[in-house]
């Protein structure tokens, strides 16, 4: 081919590609689902919540500036600190890191998009709606007042109003969005890498995000389970935390901190991940100790699940637990130290270039280390007895959180600003913002350690004069405003007009990782063609890479059919598996989120009819979305993806990303369920007689043995029918398929009915005692899953009738079968727990 014809071809390919990936215009812009749009909205929204939380912090510091201040009432102050903590943790720290990942990860992996763009969009809209709802409550004097960890019985028996429900339902709704993003990110890292990018070549950021997303998957469900229990207690009077009926508030503390401690690392690790991308760039050398960092990140993730009891040292738990958890807490300093040493080593080996980003990175590491040291102090139980619930803790936690998340995120903000906008932030203003923030932060938070040691408790609206608390408090308040000023400078720098400033050149920082291969201004396709990767820093080490990418020399240079496509590769070696067609813009995720939000929001006010209507609407929207947007049968079995390769357009079972998403979701689901089971056995350990024969003079009835066992038997039959349906579909015996699927539906519904009938017939009263309520919650959970399993089967039947599923194209059925393995397991565990365990107990 001669040059002219070649460039003609390149141009028409690029035109088609652009058309396929075009961002919708006008009001349709909001139907976009592409990672660069959704990631950007997500980031900006999370940042807005940060500013809101920051303003609340300043309001608190005004109140606390002088002793015996009555500017705020105690009740207002309670709402404000609760909202500050909850907003910072749930609406800022976790979402912003997921947001940044949604935006950056595909670019780092040379993918056109994440595998489930509509899921990201759904997660975003859920986050926005839930966040506005939770924040809005503050303006109607309806905000939660129980602190960010909402301890019962205070929040179940001693607080009026709907504040606690706003917290439980609003935040559970947002946690679902967080889990959705986690699923997306795990599958993204494992399955959507460019060919050749084996696990040991992936950017460190992707490693960290993988670890964090897995942590979210196992940390959030226990909290959701706790939320379910507390909301059931508040709405239906099921006494999980009510001691007078055998409940125990300690279960909440366990579930909360099984989530709460990993949470600290969930927000810390992704920030460190940003640091791990910036350090090599500014040191101009690959990161030292890649393997060590990965091991340390994985190790931190594991260890962080074994530390939660250090938040409960003062609750009267046995000395042996205190000893074990105290030692484990100190141990986590080791992997954290390893990572920090690797960063410092890299900076020492390299030729460091000065930049505001790097200043923030270093400030973040130093601040985090100080917070880590006070952490080592409070992990020693006798010291914790003194410091617990004082301002020493407030000092400690902010050193960790601000050093571990805020400074690195601000650094990342400077670093990736040109990536997103094509413009640069000013180094001069950046320097000013840096010093204001660093000095302001230390002036604000260092004195809190002292006021805490003097004895100032946290969560108090004011303090008496004459105890030596005046000076540290006024200094703290001044520091807080200096810190705030630093953010004002940053905001000014972001919003000041930059139309005169020329666009930056491509790869402004001369970085080595793939996200910087993007053109300036950025093109919606992400990357012109997807290269083969052989190095951790391809832009430094692979010759002529950019030229090849731009000329469409690598994979997927074209969109012949006008569809959005990306590559799916194998999890370990990143060998090509299939060409995935990802869905384009749609308002369905938006409406699905609106209706799901309605369910949670109306439930807060106990408007059950409206909530029910929303539930039906959200179900219909989600089914439409799945029906039209997933597992579509392609017009041809394979397509050529460039470089002489041809790949299948449809796969099902473990090669399909949908299968992975289902598997991961079910792991999270199972974790929530196991937390409920944990609750049941926890109550067994705290009671001498469990189940009790009688309580308060009345007999206690359980669910009996017969009907739960019938339920389990029917559940297993349903599961067998599902497997049979899968087999029959594969061998194209359609009568057998329909028959088995219908039997599956009938059995699953009957099984649900049997699980309900046992307690009903025995006269079990869930409000009577924690035994009956914890039995009832397990049954309820299982019944809901069985019904859902039935609905999934009905969906498969409809798909086959409509010709959207057939013998080879059976991804839907493969995923439903996978879900059924988990549903069957849930049913068996529930049966064994509620019906058989009482015999041995
Ligand atoms: C912007 C500067 C900040 C200031 C001036 C500030 C100030 C405060 C103050 C004074 C309290 C104590 C309230 C009390 O016990 O009475 C507090 C609590 C808290 N802060 Fe901050 N904070 C800031 C940033 C952050 C950030 C970035 C995070 C998390 C990422 C955070 C998370 C928390 C949490 C979890 C609590 C505990 C709330 C509770 O006791 O329920 N803060 N903050
Ligand atoms: Cu902890």
Image (tube, helix red, strand yellow):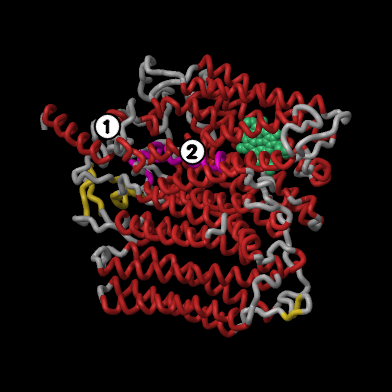
Position of residue 462 in the picture relative to residue 511 (left or right):
right
Q: CA distance from mark 1 to mark 2?
A: 25 Å
Compared with 28, 793 (above or below) is: below
Answer few, some or many: residues within 10 Å of disc 2's Cα (few below 14, many 20 plus, some between 14 and 19).
Answer: many
Residue at 34% from the left image edge and 71% from the top image edge: 726
Distance from mark 1 CB to nearest ligand 1 atom below 8 Å:
no
Residue 155 among those drawn in magenta: no
Helix, strand, or loop for circle 1? helix
Q: Is residue 508 left or right of residue 62?
A: left
Please name the residue shown 67% across and 44% down the image. 332
Specify the quadrant that holds the N terminus: top left
Q: Quadrant of residue 553?
A: top left
Rendered location of residue 638, percent (x, y):
22, 53
| Nearer to us in this view, 424 or 781 | 781
* 375, 431: nearer the viewer: 431
Q: Is residue 578 among the parts visible in the rendering?
A: yes
* Mark identifier at residue 548: 1
Label the magenta part by its dominant secondary structure: helix
Residue named by callout 2: 205
Residue range highlighted in magenta: 91-114
């Amino acid at each position: 081919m001669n040059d002219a014809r070649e460039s003609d071809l390149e141009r028409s390919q690029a035109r088609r590609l652009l058309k396929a990936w075009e961002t919708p215009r006008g009001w349709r812009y909001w139907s976009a689902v592409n990672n660069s749009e959704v990631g950007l909205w997500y980031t900006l929204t999370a940042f807005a919540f940060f500013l809101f939380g920051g303003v609340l912090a300043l309001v608190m510091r005004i109140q606390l500036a002088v002793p015996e201040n009555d500017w705020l009432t105690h009740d207002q102050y309670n709402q404000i600190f609760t909202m500050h903590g909850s907003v910072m943790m749930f609406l800022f720290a976790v979402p912003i890191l997921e947001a940044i990942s949604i935006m950056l990860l595909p670019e780092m992996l040379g993918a056109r998009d994440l595998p489930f763009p509509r899921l990201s969009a759904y997660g975003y809209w859920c986050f926005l709606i839930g966040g506005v709802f939770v924040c809005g409550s503050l303006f109607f004097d309806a905000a939660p007042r129980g602190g960010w960890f909402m301890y019962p019985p205070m929040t179940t028996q001693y607080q009026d109003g709907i504040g606690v429900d706003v917290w439980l339902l609003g935040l559970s709704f947002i946690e679902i969005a967080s889990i959705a993003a986690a699923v997306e990110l795990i599958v993204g890292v494992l399955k959507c890498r460019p060919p050749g990018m084996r696990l040991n070549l992936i950017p460190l950021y992707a490693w960290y995000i993988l670890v964090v997303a897995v942590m979210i998957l196992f940390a959030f469900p226990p909290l959701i389970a706790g939320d379910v229990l507390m909301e059931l207690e508040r709405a239906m009077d099921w006494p999980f935390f009510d001691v007078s009926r055998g409940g125990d508030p300690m279960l909440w503390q366990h579930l909360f901190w099984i989530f709460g401690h990993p949470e600290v690392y969930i927000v810390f690790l992704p920030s460190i991940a940003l640091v791990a991308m910036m350090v090599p760039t500014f040191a101009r050398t690959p990161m030292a100790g890649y393997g060590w960092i990965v091991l340390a990140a994985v190790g931190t993730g594991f260890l962080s699940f074994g530390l939660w009891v250090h938040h409960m040292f003062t609750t009267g738990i046995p000395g042996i637990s205190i000893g074990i958890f105290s030692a484990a807490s100190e141990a986590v300093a080791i992997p954290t130290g390893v990572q920090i040493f690797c960063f410092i080593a890299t900076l020492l080996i390299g030729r460091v270039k000065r930049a505001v980003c790097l200043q923030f990175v270093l400030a973040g590491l130093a601040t985090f280390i100080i917070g880590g040291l006070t952490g080592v102090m409070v992990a020693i139980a006798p010291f914790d007895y003194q410091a617990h619930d004082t301002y020493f803790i407030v000092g400690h936690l902010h050193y960790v959180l601000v050093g571990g998340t805020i400074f690195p995120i601000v650094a990342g903000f400077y670093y990736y600003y040109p990536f997103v906008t094509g413009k640069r932030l000013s180094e001069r203003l950046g320097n000013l913002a840096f010093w204001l923030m660093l000095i302001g932060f230390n002036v604000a938070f260092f004195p809190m350690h002292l006021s805490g040691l003097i004895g100032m408790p946290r969560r108090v609206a004011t303090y008496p004069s004459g105890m030596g608390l005046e000076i540290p408090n006024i200094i703290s308040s001044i520091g807080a405003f200096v810190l705030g000023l630093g953010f004002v400078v940053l905001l000014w720098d972001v919003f000041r007009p930059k139309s005169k400033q020329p666009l930056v050149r491509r790869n402004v920082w001369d970085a080595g990782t793939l996200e910087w291969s993007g053109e300036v201004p950025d093109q919606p396709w992400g990357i012109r063609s997807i290269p083969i990767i052989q190095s951790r820093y391809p832009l430094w080490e692979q010759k002529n890479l950019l030229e090849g990418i731009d000329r469409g020399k690598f994979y997927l240079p074209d969109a012949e059919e006008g569809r959005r496509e990306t590559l799916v590769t194998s999890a370990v070696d990143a060998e090509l598996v299939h060409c995935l067609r990802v869905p384009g813009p749609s308002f369905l995720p938006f409406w699905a989120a609106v209706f799901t939000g309605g369910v949670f929001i109306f439930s807060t006010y106990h408007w059950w009819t409206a909530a029910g209507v929303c539930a039906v609407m959200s179900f219909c929207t989600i089914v439409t979305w799945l029906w039209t947007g997933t597992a579509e049968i392609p017009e041809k079995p394979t397509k050529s993806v460039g470089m002489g390769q041809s790949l299948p357009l449809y796969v099902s079972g473990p090669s399909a990303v949908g299968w992975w998403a289902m598997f991961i979701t079910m792991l999270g689901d199972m974790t929530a369920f196991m937390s409920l089971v944990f609750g049941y056995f926890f109550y067994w350990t705290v009671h001498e007689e469990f189940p009790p024969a009688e309580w308060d003079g009345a007999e206690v009835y359980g669910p009996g043995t017969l009907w739960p066992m019938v339920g389990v038997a029917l559940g297993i039959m349903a599961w067998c029918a599902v497997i049979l349906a899968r087999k029959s579909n594969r061998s194209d015996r359609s009568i057998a398929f329909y028959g088995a699927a219908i039997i599956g539906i009938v059995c699953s519904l009957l099984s649900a009915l049997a699980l309900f009938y046992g307690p009903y017939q025995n006269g079990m009263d869930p409000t009577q005692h924690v035994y009956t309520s914890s039995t009832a919650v397990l049954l309820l959970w299982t019944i809901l899953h069985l019904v859902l399993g039935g609905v999934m089967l009905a969906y498969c039947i409809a798909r086959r009738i409509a010709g959207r599923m057939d013998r080879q194209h059976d991804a839907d059925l493969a995923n439903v079968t996978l879900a059924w393995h988990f549903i069957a397991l849930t049913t068996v565990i529930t049966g064994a727990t509620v019906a058989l365990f009482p015999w041995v107990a």
